[in-house]
Amino acid sequence: MASNWEFPRVSFKSRRKMQHN
């Protein structure tokens, strides 16, 4: 979801989880 990537703090956690997945 682009919405999550747009946010910095959310992206930080989402990115780590998404990349790990």
Image: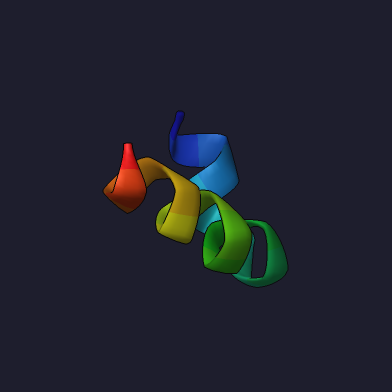
Seen from the viewer's position, the closer of residues 11 and 3 is 11
* In this view, 2 is above or below 9: above
Would residue 9 be found to the left or right of residue 2 on screen?
Answer: right
- On the image, the x and y values in percent for residue 16 come to 44, 60
Quadrant for residue 12, please give it: bottom right
Seen from the viewer's position, the closer of residues 17 and 11 is 17
| Number of marks in picture | 0
The residue shown at (61%, 71%) is 8
* In this view, 5 is above or below 1: below
Would residue 1 be found to the left or right of residue 11 on screen?
Answer: left
The residue shown at (70%, 69%) is 9
* In this view, 12 is above or below 18: below
- On the image, the x and y values in percent for residue 4 come to 57, 43
* In this view, 21 is above or below 15: above
Seen from the viewer's position, the closer of residues 9 and 6 is 9
The residue shown at (47%, 48%) is 17
In this view, the residue farthest toward the top is 1
- On the image, the x and y values in percent for residue 20 come to 33, 48
Q: How is the image coloured?
A: rainbow
Would residue 21 be found to the left or right of residue 9 on screen?
Answer: left
- On the image, the x and y values in percent for residue 5 come to 48, 51
The residue shown at (46%, 28%) is 1
Q: Quadrant of the C terminus?
A: top left
